[in-house]
Image: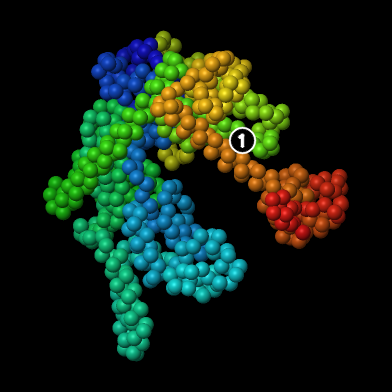
């Protein structure tokens, strides 16, 4: 860990303009991004008395090894640039508002030929309309009720294909909760109209549909069609049930998001009620760890910046009015930025009295409860994780804390389809975005130790290449003609004055550009391999050959769960009740699961062989196009290059490659006895 005084810039070198600054660790990774009205004042606050900083800020300052800054013209530009860089670099010490739970949305896939209603979580998809968020029970009850009135398809793609192939609808079609477009009961156009009505009702036009059904019910009664009138009566009751589920809390023309928070010295909980048409349509919550000594206005600013920067661009859910507990920092610039996202004016207000203030009080009560619940649930988990990491560090006699652990496992069946997995744990929690899979071929697939050596070599070779590129880029910037040439922190300032200026201009011009995804993240403190002494020594040799000397290696053997160190004749035996041992076992089991799933996937593909597999440049889709056009592999073999180009996606070069492949006797050549494609597990002939 670096001493802050070793990279502290000289006070006179730091400008007093507004700008954005970045702290980097020894590996060049950005670990914190911040903005300031006065860069000199803000940066000096980190170095004046590091011992007096908040615990997480103290850890950030000591984890960093350099600081850079970029001057901008206004506070609005600093707001935009800070958001862009947080989204790009994902710094580990920045305030991140994480959902305290994953709320489901009611989604309608309007981008499909036959739109589908379903409950969805996670990333938003293009062409899909979302309503919510809701609680899990409420959303399914709402969906079940509305399908009675708007019988839109809710089945999966597989069920739809089976129904189309058999000519018989699924159960929902028989009980009148689906209009069964799969068997032609309604046309695709009529089904899309149903989906549009479903979306319109969920969008707040409930009264229009209820009035229309009441009119139709009256007409049915007038002609003595009491059966239809009874069905319409039940439909009206169902719609009213859904419509009245959300109580009216504000005027019916009010669209607003109401935020409230409850905080202590280390954490803050945020709740928001989404009010649309005067009714509470959804609720969300976040819990955040404080990094700097943030005031409540600072927290509100970062909250709105992150929530609407992510959600509004995708969902278009930014309302006309945003109600907050206190006025955020840079309120005017923030409102201007949000207005640019929405395409219309956005008011950021603090309700003082009336219905909106009463609703704010209710939201605040939810935030207080959420923080209490979060602390209750997390206390045990945080204590156990910290204890496990501390026990591992002490038992293995490691000089560094185990912030990042990577575990590797090799999977195969009798030396076939050899694969390996890499799973990652940061601060005791899995980081699935950094998981990796490896296919192993050639000499490395001969045994487990060779495979482990190959995997570690490939993983850390990529890291060394990225590290070398970063060092070269930094040296290039530091030696730029307009560099300051000052000692200590001057190269960082030069960096900010040259390369960062171009990056800042690009970031300010387009804040929606997706961040590039790094192939590998920073190196781990500890590498765990699944196996005993041979596997550990193979991993250690791989790191030694690459010159990596700051990563420690251990192995966990399955038989007695002993921990092996490189070049050690005796293992380290952890107590059976050790939290450190439990953590190693969980990491090892996760690596094993991830490797097994990849092995099964690869083995499943290998079970199918085809006479067309060896044709260079011929993928699965073009192979299917050829079979659909010619009907069999035998006809493909007999076709000329000109005839082959008639198939979709097949050009002259690919056609020539196919002719050459079969004329040379590839994959069975012209033998009529060869089977073009067979599933080796079931014996099913896939190509005729």
Position of the N terminus, as image quadrant, is top left
Q: Residue at x 48, y 31 (%)?
A: 585
In percent of width and height, residue 184 lies at 54, 73
The colour mode here is rainbow
- The 10 Å Cα crowd at callout 1, few under 14, some 14 to 19, many 20 or more, is many
Q: Secondary structure at mark 1?
A: strand
Which of 616 and 263 lies nearest the eye of the viewer? 263
Please, which residue is most extreme toward the bottom here?
Answer: 223
Q: What percent of the width, then of the height, locates residue 663? A: 86, 48
Q: Quadrant of the C terminus?
A: bottom right
Q: Which residue is mark 1?
A: 411
- The mark tally for this picture is 1
Q: Position of residue 106 (x, y in %)?
A: 39, 57
Q: Is residue 494 visible?
A: no
Please name the residue shown 27% across and 36% down the image.
Answer: 375
Residue 657 against residue 460 in the figure, above or below: below
Instruction: Residue at 29%, 72% (x, y): give it.
Output: 237
- Residue at 38% x, 63% y: name it: 143
Judge whether 398 appears above or below 204 on screen: above
Q: Nearer the viewer, residue 370 or 652?
A: 370
Q: Position of residue 539 (x, y in %)?
A: 59, 22
Residue 12 seen from this side: yes
């Amino acid at each position: 860990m670096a001493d802050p005084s070793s990279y502290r810039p000289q006070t006179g070198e730091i400008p007093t303009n507004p700008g954005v600054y970045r702290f980097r660790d020894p590996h060049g990774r950005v670990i914190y991004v911040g903005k300031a009205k006065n860069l000199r004042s803000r940066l000096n606050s980190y170095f004046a008395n590091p011992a007096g900083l908040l615990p997480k800020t103290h850890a950030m300052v000591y984890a960093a090894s350099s600081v850079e800054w970029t001057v901008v013209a206004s506070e609005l530009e600093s707001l935009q640039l800070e958001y862009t860089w947080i989204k790009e670099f994902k710094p580990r010490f920045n305030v991140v508002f994480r959902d305290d739970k994953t709320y489901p949305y009611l989604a309608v896939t309007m981008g499909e030929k036959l739109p589908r209603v379903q409950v969805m979580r996670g990333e938003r998809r293009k062409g899909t309309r979302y309503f919510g968020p809701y609680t899990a029970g409420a959303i399914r009850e709402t969906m079940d009720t509305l399908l009675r009135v708007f019988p839109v398809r809710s089945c999966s793609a597989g069920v739809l294909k089976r129904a189309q192939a058999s000519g018989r609808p699924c159960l929902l079609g028989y009980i009148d909760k689906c209009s069964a477009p799969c068997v032609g009961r309604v046309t695709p156009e009529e089904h899309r109209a149903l989906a549009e009505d479903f979306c319109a009702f969920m969008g707040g036009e409930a009264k229009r549909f209820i009035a229309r059904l009441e009119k139709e019910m009256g007409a049915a009664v007038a002609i003595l069609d009491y059966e239809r009138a009874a069905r319409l009566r039940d439909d009206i009751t169902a719609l009213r049930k859904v419509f009245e589920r959300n109580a009216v809390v504000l005027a019916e023309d009010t669209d607003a998001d109401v935020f409230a928070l409850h905080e202590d010295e280390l954490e803050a909980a945020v709740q928001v009620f989404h009010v649309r048409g005067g009714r509470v349509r959804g609720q969300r919550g976040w819990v955040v760890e404080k990094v700097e000594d943030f005031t409540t206005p600072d927290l509100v600013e970062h909250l709105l910046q992150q929530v609407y920067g992510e959600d509004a661009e995708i969902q278009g859910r930014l309302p006309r009015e945003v109600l907050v507990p206190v006025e955020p920092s840079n309120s005017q610039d923030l409102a201007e930025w949000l207005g640019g996202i929405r395409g219309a004016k956005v008011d950021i207000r603090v309700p003082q009295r009336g219905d909106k203030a009463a609703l704010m009080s209710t939201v605040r009560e939810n935030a207080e409860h959420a923080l209490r619940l979060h602390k209750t649930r997390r206390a045990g988990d945080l204590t156990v994780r910290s204890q496990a990491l501390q026990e591992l560090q002490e038992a293995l006699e490691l000089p560094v804390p185990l912030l990042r652990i990577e575990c590797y496992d090799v999977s195969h069946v009798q030396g076939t389809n050899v694969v390996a997995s890499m799973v990652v744990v940061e601060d005791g929690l899995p980081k699935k975005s950094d998981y990796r899979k490896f296919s192993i071929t050639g000499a490395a697939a001969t045994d487990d130790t060779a495979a482990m050596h190959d995997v570690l070599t490939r993983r850390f070779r990529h890291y060394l290449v990225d590290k070398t590129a970063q060092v070269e880029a930094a040296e290039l910037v530091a030696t730029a003609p307009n560099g300051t040439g000052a000692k200590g922190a001057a190269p960082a300032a030069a960096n900010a004055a040259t390369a960062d200026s171009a990056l800042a201009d690009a970031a300010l011009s387009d804040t929606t550009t997706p961040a590039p995804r790094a192939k590998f993240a920073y190196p781990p403190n500890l590498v765990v391999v699944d196996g005993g002494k041979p596997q550990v020594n193979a991993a250690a040799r791989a790191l030694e050959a690459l010159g990596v000397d700051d990563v420690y290696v251990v192995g966990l053997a399955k038989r007695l769960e002993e921990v092996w160190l490189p070049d050690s004749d005796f293992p380290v035996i952890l107590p059976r009740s050790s939290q450190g041992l439990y953590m190693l076992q969980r990491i090892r089991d996760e690596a094993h699961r991830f490797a097994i799933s990849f092995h099964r996937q690869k083995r499943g593909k290998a079970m199918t062989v085809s006479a067309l597999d060896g044709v260079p440049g011929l993928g699965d889709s073009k192979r299917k196009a050829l079979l659909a056009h010619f009907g069999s592999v035998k006809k493909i073999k007999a076709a000329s290059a000109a005839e082959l180009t008639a198939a979709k996606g097949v050009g002259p070069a690919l056609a020539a490659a196919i002719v050459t492949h079969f004329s040379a006797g590839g994959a069975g050549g012209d033998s009529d006895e060869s089977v073009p494609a067979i599933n080796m597990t079931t014996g099913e002939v896939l190509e005729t």
